[in-house]
Image (cartoon, rainbow, N blue to C red):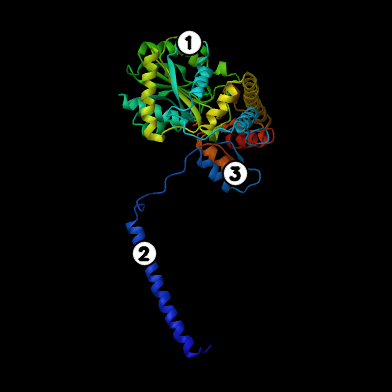
Amino acid sequence: MILPSISRSVLRQHSKAAARYATNIHASRTMATSSSPWSQFEMAPTDPIVGLNEIYNKDDFPSKVIVGVGAYRDDLGKPYVLPCVREAEQILMDKNLDMEYTGIAGEPKFVDLALKFVYGEDSVPIQENRVHGVQALSGTGGLRVFGELMAKHGHKHIYVPNPTWGNHIPIFTNSGLEVRKYRYYDAESSDLDFTNMMKDIKDMPKGSLILLHACAHNPTGMDPTMEQWKEMSETIKKQGLVPFFDCAYQGFASGDPVKDASSVRMFVEDGHLISMVQSFSKNFGLYGQRIGALSVVGADEDEAKRVVSQMKMVIRPMYSNPPRQGARIVTTILEDPRLTQDFLDQCRGMADRINLMRTLLQDKLAEAGSTKNWDHITKQIGMFAYSGLNKDQVMEMREKHHVYCTADGRISMAGVTSGNVDYIANAIHDVSK
Ligand SMILES: Cc1ncc(COP(=O)(O)O)c(C=O)c1O
């Protein structure tokens, strides 16, 4: 096509301008990358548990199943808000409360109720007013504050069970503590490795911090018996260790919050000056509200209060003060006997459904033709089944069957439903036969 001369000259000007523009853009991009303060940042690996959701979401297979993250689902596989929580929200809404800051230690009424919930109202140190604590950003936040508090007060290391919840390790490392492990589980027999655990406890240097899962050990679901807890309590005392309880599943394990607090209460009765983190994520289903508590049993009231004052010194520059809504919800429920009873019934309902799924999964594995011993599925307690599947089997289950669990073979029983249990059982059998 022959263009009129005027058009050609305009075009030439335009293309020169376009070329200049492109050169400038290129130059500024090059400058931006070479002088960018972020250029040295490498892409971090995805979280082994939370990142599983991202992989799952990209899978468009219609019957895909996720049994990864530990969050309760109803029998239709849907997230569940406890009706008592919905009712508490309505009560709070009707009160038209303000949104002012709470104190560094959170809502005092919540902390009081949370401590009575786990230690028991008639616990001697509660009666003697020597158990004190702070509201925490759920279990994770409480663990982090505790780690930093202890590192600031001369502790160099903490012993955690092997295996333990994956996040314990970076939480304590980031707090400035060296993480050491004690034997806990025997993968061969899919059982607690009690003998070796006791050997390791006896080898711990005096004054060491030792982390204990109060109930529903994550990831194994295998808890010591009460007799074994007694032996641990005696040995930990004799060794002069400092026991720290992580109580993330109170009520969620057996369906009874008092029973699930037995290990903690026994240690306190035995005279241990324990510390503890509580989470209300699972038992109250308040995952995203980030509500928990961090507490300590002191030799006397003054001592417990001094420790809390130091917790506040860690919290203030870290996040200043915690959010209020979760604390208000738990408080509304626990200060009302009728709502507390509703909570107990609804919490038991979740635990019962999970236990039913355990039995069903074991039965369905047998029905699928598996001749392996799957007794541990029903022997374990709480949210997870530590299946015993190895990493290759887990990957095969993902690729071939679109069933997603964590690489260590941990299956969130809360994600198993009467609608998908057959499918999951067949997938497990197929990769493990
Ligand atoms: C043993 C254990 N501790 C603490 C937590 C922390 O949970 P959250 O921060 O939601 O309370 C979890 C969650 O899975 C857990 O399993």
- The label on residue 158 is none
Taking the view exactly as shown, the residue that stands out farthest to the left is: 154
Q: Nearer the viewer, residue 390 or 136?
A: 136
Query: In terms of sequence position, does the residue under pointer 1 or pointer 2 come before the other?
Result: 2
Q: Which residue type carries mark 1?
A: Gln
- Crowding near the residue tagged with mark 2, few <14, some 14–19, many ≥20 C-alpha atoms within 10 Å: few
- Mark 1 nearby-residue class (10 Å; few <14, some 14–19, many ≥20): few
The label shown at residue 127 is: 1
* Element marked by disc 1: helix
Number of labels in the image equals 3
Residue 66 at x, y = what percent?
A: 59, 39
Position of residue 90 measured from the top left corner of the image (x, y, whole percent) = 63, 32
Whether label 2 touches label 3, CB < 8 Å = no
What is the secondary structure assignment of the residue under circle 3? helix
* Image quadrant in which you'd find residue 79: top right
Asked if the residues shown at circle 1 and circle 2 are in contact, with their CB atoms under 8 angstroms apart, the answer is: no
Task: Give percent across and percent down for residue 133.
Answer: 44, 22
First of labels 3, 1 by sequence position? 1
Residue 129, above or below 75: above
Residue, disc 2: 28
In 3D space, how far apart are the residues under numbered discs 3 and 1 (Cα atoms)? 57 Å
Q: Is residue 100 visible?
A: yes
* Label 1 to label 2: alpha-carbon separation: 68 Å
Identify the residue position indicated by label 3 in the image.
400
